[in-house]
Amino acid sequence: MTHALDRRAIHLHNARPEETETLARIGLEAWLKGIAPLVPDGVRQEILADNPFIPFLKSFGPAVIVGTINGEPAGIGACEHAEDTISDIWVAPAFEGLGVGTALVRSLETEILNRGHPVAYIQVAALNSRAFSLYRHLGYREEWRQMSFDPILKVEMEKVGLSKQL
């Protein structure tokens, strides 16, 4: 099966309670690839022991968008704390490069616009080059860059704030 065929098979839906475990596993797999290399081993072990995607999914439920390829969950996205800010885009490593992240971002941009916000915002770890490249490719422009302490990851890291006129 070609990548082009896979792209056409991307479908989006709101998360359902029965998907929580599967979606939490996708979030954790994506986190392990993109963020875990940037944090101390102790933090990585804590995240592995107590997958934070489970309470996240239970809390935000249907507000989380699920991207599927040929019926298989491949990624999740959400605007967790702000109506105009994309907080989460997590794509399972097995589905990277097939358009799932793009589909999730575009869906969330539509939601942001429908809520009356003409600009979408997103933050990314500066060293998460794959995500940073995706957002730049989708038209996001860097607004700020700063070192800050991440209380969840318990580490100082460089973050980049991006925005896009919708």
Image (tube, grey):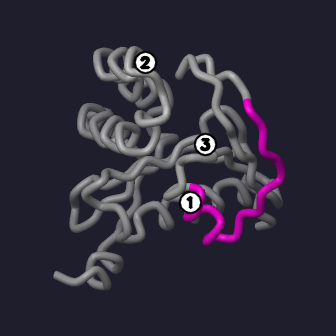
Identify the residue at image location x=71%, y=58%: 114
Q: Is residue 106 left or right of residue 104?
A: right
The verdict on residue 140 being magenta is yes
Q: Quadrant of residue 54?
A: top left
> Which of 40/5 is in front?
40
Q: Amino acid at mark 1?
A: Val
Look at the numbered disc 2 and give the secondary structure of its residue.
Answer: helix
Residue at screen point 31% across, 60% down: 68
Query: Disc 2 marks which residue?
Result: 43
What is the magenta range? Answer: 132-147
Structural distance between the alpha carbons of marks 2 and 1: 28 Å
Q: Is residue 84 above or below residue 68?
A: above
Query: Label 3 neighbourhood size at 10 Å, few (<14), some (14-19), many (20+)?
Result: some
Quarter of the image where one finds residue 34? top left
Q: Name the mark nearer the viewer: 1 or 3.
A: 3
- Residue at 78% in and 57% down: 142
- Which residue bears the numbered disc 3? 125
